[in-house]
Image: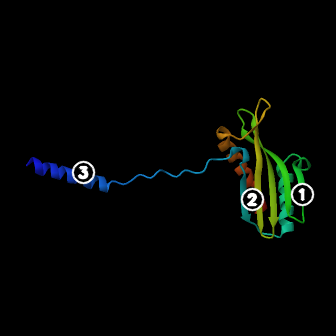
Amino acid sequence: MNRALIIIMTAAGILASSCSTATTPATSAPPIDYANATFTREFAATGTQKALYNKSLEYIAESFKSATDVIKYQNPEEGKIIGKAVTSWNSLTGNNVFYTFVIEVADGHAKITAKNIYIHTDNGQDVPLWSGTYEGAKKSIEADLANYEAWVSK
């Protein structure tokens, strides 16, 4: 009887171990390179390159206090505008997010990219994005990019 019990227990152990599922390590996203973070919004847009370029200029003129201070480069033939922007990241602390935006338009197509992103802190320091600021900055910048898309898509 003891021998039968040992055989049954051994068989049950082997069966249980062969039925268990092997755990595979979860694949995680690659680490974020905060210092070189970029955000892009690319979309189909109705209009010629010239019309979309002009709409982009209108967006900048309506969205910023001084379009001439914001725009750092513009080329209608390329359909390209480069500018500097600031958006509120944390209104409680006074921290703002500064970034370079690049608008590129072509017939039926528009793209805006935010890059060279940094935080200007309430104590006057400019610091690159880091894990504690990334999500807030991302939310603010993506809202700006969505506003651009909505304007150009009117």
Quarter holding residue 108:
bottom right
Q: Nearer the viewer, residue 44 or 62?
A: 44
User: Could you tell me the amino acid type at mark 2?
Assistant: Glu
User: Could you tell me the amino acid type at mark 3?
Assistant: Gly
Quarter holding residue 125:
top right
Residue at x 70%, y 33% (from the top left corner) = 92
Q: Nearer the viewer, residue 114 or 16?
A: 16
Q: CA distance from mark 3 to mark 2?
A: 61 Å
| Residue 32 percent across, percent down from the top left | 65, 47
Report helix, strand or loop for mark 3: helix
Residue at x 44%, y 52% (from the top left corner) = 24
Q: CA distance from mark 2 to mark 1?
A: 19 Å
Q: CA distance from mark 3 to mark 1?
A: 73 Å
* Disc 3 target residue: 13
* Disc 2 target residue: 149
Q: Is 32 placed above or below 93 here?
A: below
Label whose residue precedes the other's in the sequence (3 or 1)? 3
Residue at x 72%, y 36% (from the top left corner) = 91
User: Could you tell me the amino acid type at mark 1?
Assistant: Gln
| Residue 15 percent across, percent down from the top left | 26, 55
Q: Residues within 10 Å of mark 3 (few under 14, many from 20)?
A: few
* Disc 1 target residue: 74
| Residue 7 percent across, percent down from the top left | 16, 52
Residue 43 - label: none
| Residue 79 percent across, percent down from the top left | 85, 63
Report helix, strand or loop for mark 1: strand
Relative placement, left or right, of 63 versus 138 is: right
